[in-house]
Image (cartoon, helix red, strand yellow):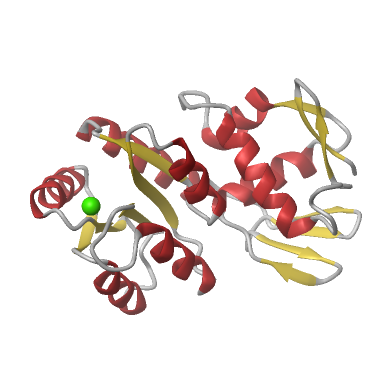
């Protein structure tokens, strides 16, 4: 992965400030002032590692940009910038494929730390060439691809990490804290709800009936279990 980012924010002063600080942190940063511009840049730069996307934009909103990125099968990291107190914005963002979110107003130190953390997670050390298999699923750790009955299922990076954690621990009760640590890292401070939201999205992709999950079962008041 290369250290190439996209920052999408319509307010010039905020955007310049974010870009400046991310460049100082050693990233190459492309910038867009509206959704349309960002999608053009993404079309020409398939090697963007992470996109920082503001939710409120003058043309198409940040959700739509996120949706279109994922609809193209692109697995770049996505961090959404959401307004304070809009809990539903965060959940919606995560449901449509964002990996993380930051609430405005944020400190630039926090933003750079989140970008760094996501970048580390996505570049993810050395992965052996191996395949984890469980029931109808096959997870290729090198290509980070999941197949169910030989059919490919598109995953975000976070979903990949969750399913990897599950498949490495079949039949084990995993607490939400366990999953948070395994996927987001132990220094990540966040509402545990981020785990539930990602599980919900993952179920929609892998379960035959997400309302009656067979593979990822819920352990009420504790966490989740992968039924191997
Ligand atoms: Ca805005």
Direction from residue 120 to residue 21 in the image, left or right: left
Query: In this rendering, does residue 189 appear at all?
Result: yes
Work out whether 191 lies above or below 104: above
Image quadrant where residue 222 sits = top right
- Considering only vertical position in the picture, is 127 above or below 184? below
Q: Quadrant of the C terminus?
A: top right
Q: Residue at x 70, y 46 (%)?
A: 164
What residue is rendered at 32% in x and 34% in y?
Answer: 84
- Write down the quadrant of residue 6 in the picture: bottom left
Q: Nearer the viewer, residue 104 or 46?
A: 104
In the rendered image of this protein, does residue 101 appear above or below residue 3? Answer: above
Quadrant in which the N terminus appears: bottom left
Q: Is residue 120 visible?
A: no
Question: Percent position (x, y) of residue 109?
Answer: 23, 31
Residue 78 location (% of width, % of height): 42, 53
Number of marks in picture:
0
User: What's the residue at 27%, 68% (across, down)?
Assistant: 59
Q: Is residue 208 left or right of residue 109?
A: right
The picture places residue 117, in percent across and down from the top left corner, at: 41, 38
Q: Is residue 39 left or right of residue 90?
A: left
Toward the viewer: 95 or 15?
A: 95
Residue at 63 percent across and 63 percent down: it is: 143
Residue 171 percent across, percent down from the top left: 89, 34
The correct choice, above or below, for 17 with respect to 194 in the image is: below
């Amino acid at each position: 992965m290369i250290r190439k980012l996209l920052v999408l924010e319509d307010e010039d002063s905020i955007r310049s400030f974010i870009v400046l600080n991310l460049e100082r942190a050693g990233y190459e940063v492309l910038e867009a002032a509206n959704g349309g511009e960002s999608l053009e840049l993404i079309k020409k730069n398939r090697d963007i590692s992470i996109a920082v996307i503001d939710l409120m934009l003058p043309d198409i909103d940040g959700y739509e940009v996120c949706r279109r990125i994922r609809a193209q099968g692109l697995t770049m990291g996505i961090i959404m910038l959401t307004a304070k107190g809009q809990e539903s914005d965060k959940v919606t963002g995560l449901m449509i494929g964002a990996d993380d979110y930051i609430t405005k107003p944020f400190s630039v130190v926090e933003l750079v730390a989140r970008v760094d953390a996501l970048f580390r997670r996505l570049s993810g050390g050395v992965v052996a060439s191996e395949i984890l298999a469980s029931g109808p699923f096959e997870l290729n750790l090198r290509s980070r691809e999941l197949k169910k009955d030989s059919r490919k299922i598109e995953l975000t990076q976070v979903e990949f990490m969750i399913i990897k954690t599950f498949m490495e621990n079949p039949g084990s009760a995993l607490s939400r804290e366990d999953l948070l640590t395994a996927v987001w890292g132990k220094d990540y401070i966040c509402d545990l709800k981020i785990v539930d939201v990602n599980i919900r999205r993952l179920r929609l992709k892998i379960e035959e009936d997400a309302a009656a999950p067979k593979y990822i079962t819920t352990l009420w008041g504790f966490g989740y279990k992968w039924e191997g």
